[in-house]
Amino acid sequence: MRTNLIYVLICILIFTPSANAQTEKHKYYPESDTAVLNKLEHWQDIKFGLLMHWGPYSQRGIVESWSICSEDEGWCQRKSDNYEQYKQDYENLKTTFNPLKFNPEKWAEAAAYAGMKYVVFTTKHHDGFCMFDTKTTNYKVTDPGCPFHTNPKANITKEIFSAFRSKGFLTGAYFSKPDWNCNYYWWPYFATPDRNCNYNINKYPDRWENFVQFTHTQINELMTNYDTVDILWLDGGWVKKYTNEELTRYRNKPDFKQCNLQSQDIRMSEIVKKAREKQPGLIVVNRAVEGPYQNYLTPENRVPENAIYDYPWESCIIAGGGWSYAFNATYKSGYEAVKLLVDIVAKGGNLLLNIAPGPEGDFDQGAYDMLKEIGDWMKVNSECIYNTRAHKPYKTGKIYFTEHKSGKYLYAVYMPDEDETTLPEIIMIYGLNLPQKINISLLGSEESITCERTGKGLQINVSETIISNNRGKYAWVFKIKK
């Protein structure tokens, strides 16, 4: 195991600006549990995953959860001037949620063809609607008040995990720590000025303890009743234990807008201990909360620039529309998706690509088209993605580099411009320390490749036959034996 990838102490990731409590620089805390380290190593090998945001909100094609939060941001504004009525209507979407085209086997097959190897599904977002069968609330897909509850596949989380697990995927449970439907978090006695718990926890500790137990119970259900769960992906980074100094620092920021930010300790150490008793080796991602329960870091909808990070990290990226389902969404082209994957992997990360199912329980055709285009490329070139680690430099010009974790092979990925569908006759590679005798090949081609050293670097000569037989494949990969 390449422990140097795990035991780097300093991280400089900056998290999503949508949450003030998540915009701090983070230190990476290395894990010591051998079972977790082994699973993290495997997770770093497989590189490519699917994230799905899905709930009753898909019926309206609106942002997940956030429109019922009383924060005045452009990306979560309500098309209503009556908040209470809007929130009631939003929660009543449960009564019309009936995704009869739900077929997780179809999703798993498409994702597997694309080369994805793990799935993270929103078992519960901030609105509190549970896409799994829980005993803690009736705000769930299996409740008699939801028409889908009579469907044999009503326990949506279970069906998704089962379908993807049958294709060899690791399974991950996205779980929101805040719960805006739970009376122990948003107490109806008070108004809800922002995303935080809306009462003074120090004044009402018993009510907060009820919420802590509510949260522990739901996570325990997920860890107990859904076979093997590999990743617990916790969102809502403002739900954490704060020191007084941290609270003061946040509140003194010029752009700070939250009214009720306070220490919200849900006792993560207990959650993780109990979860790993049920799921040994469980990867825990307590997103945007610096500390030992953030086994890998998660820059949101962006790729770190001009750097290679040697600790485990993953960019979660929207494939089309938004995180939640959007009508008439435009999805990434095969070229855009492949370039994104190559860029992230070359920098040492994983790509978690988000596709949001629609209200009837299916992906848009544009999502399936994108997945097929990625898969067509991966069918030939996945060797430069799986089981690789970052190489320094990670890029020179149009060439991205990845290295097999054994150290035996270097992959040089020629990433053309989008309108460039033909390999050039000469490709130059700079800045590499290579052996005198070089064995080089082009993935997907049986033609021999010649190369020569020049004063500038390594010159790869591409024959006319190779050029004519390898057109329009988004990116071409040269394999160099070290």
Image (cartoon, grey):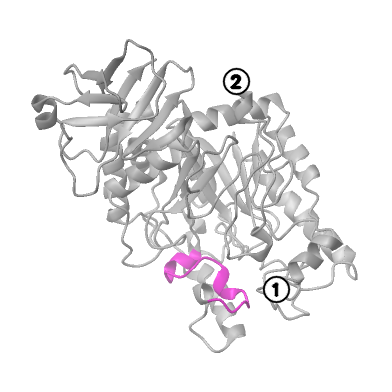
How far is the residue under mark 2 from the one under mark 1? 43 Å
Q: Is residue 238 left or right of residue 174?
A: right
Badge 1 element: loop
Highlighted range, magenta? 56-73
**Residue at coordinates 60% horizontally, 54% vertically from top-left?**
14
Q: Is residue 260 left or right of residue 386?
A: right
Where residue 440 appears, as percent x and y from the top left, is: 28, 18
**Residue at coordinates 20% horizontally, 19% vertically from top-left?**
449
Quadrant showing the N terminus: top right
Q: Residues within 10 Å of mark 2 (few under 14, many from 20)?
A: few
Q: Main secondary structure of the magenta part?
A: loop
User: Is residue 443 visible in this depiction of the protein?
Assistant: no
Q: Nearer the viewer, residue 53 or 85?
A: 53
Query: Residue under circle 1?
Result: 258
Q: Amino acid at mark 1?
A: Gln
Residue 376 is marked as none
Query: Residue under circle 2?
Result: 1
Where residue 73 appears, as percent x and y from the top left, is: 56, 76
